[in-house]
Image (cartoon, rainbow, N blue to C red):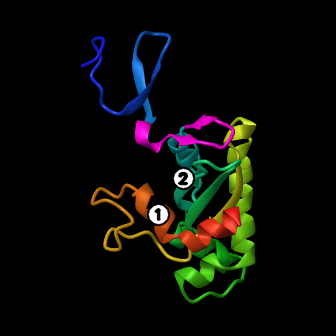
Amino acid sequence: IVDGWLQTGDVVEHLDNGEITIVDRKKSIIITSGGKNITPSEIENALKDSIYIAEAIVVGEGRNFLGALVQIDYDTVGKWAQAEGMAYTTFGHLAGLDPVKELIAKEVARVNDTFARVENIRKFVLLKKELDHDDGEMTATQKVRRNVIETKFETEMSEIYG
């Protein structure tokens, strides 16, 4: 306890009514190359509000813009693709279709409109597989393991940042 506060590792926001709300984990904060502190969970949750997005991981630590690794919602995007007359065989095949990338780009643009420019996702990559607890990418409670993701998806990270 420091100055009467329990140090939990959470970032909080003080509300006008005197309450506090947890915004993100302190260790999850992204600091861009320009020194801006970004709380990725707010952006990720806004992306996951889309029926087409199952998971989103905002990246950009030490970079000059934010990117995202996006996992499509296989069932919803699959139904959309079928309705559009697109054939696909696997999760990876579906995620690799250009119209699917365009669909997700519209969702990303919609979310970007609700955030400050510095918090906008400038580039994203669709994951070719579903994140999995058995592969160490998620915890038992289905939370993304950030530290694992950025190293495991190095190829996708280089698609975003070159």
Residue behind mark 1? 149
**Quarter placement of the N terminus:** top left
Q: Residues within 10 Å of mark 2 (few under 14, many from 20)?
A: many
Contact, mark 2 vs mark 1 (Cβ under 8 Å): no
Q: What span is in magenta? A: 25-38
The kind of secondary structure element at disc 1 is helix
Mark 2–mark 1 distance (CA, rounded to whole Å) = 17 Å
- Disc ID at residue 34: none
> Would residue 84 be visible to someone looking at this image?
yes
Residue 127 is situated, as x and y percent measured from the top left of the image, at 56, 71
Q: Residues within 10 Å of mark 1 (few under 14, many from 20)?
A: some
Residue 80 is situated, as x and y percent measured from the top left of the image, at 64, 71
Location of residue 114 with respect to 19 vertically, above or below: below
Query: In the image, is residue 69 part of the stretch drawn in magenta?
Result: no
Picture quadrant of residue 34 = top right
Seen from this angle, which residue lies furthest left? 1
Between discs 2 and 1, the one toward the N terminus: 2
Q: Is residue 23 left or right of residue 8?
A: right
Residue 33 is situated, as x and y percent measured from the top left of the image, at 66, 43
Residue behind mark 2? 48
Location of residue 4 with respect to 101 vertically, above or below: above
Picture quadrant of residue 141 = bottom left
Location of residue 143 with respect to 3 vertically, above or below: below
> Would residue 52 be visible to someone looking at this image?
no
- The amino acid sitting under disc 1 is Ile
Query: Image point 70% across, 83% down: which residue?
Result: 86
Query: Image point 58% across, 62% down: which residue?
Result: 69
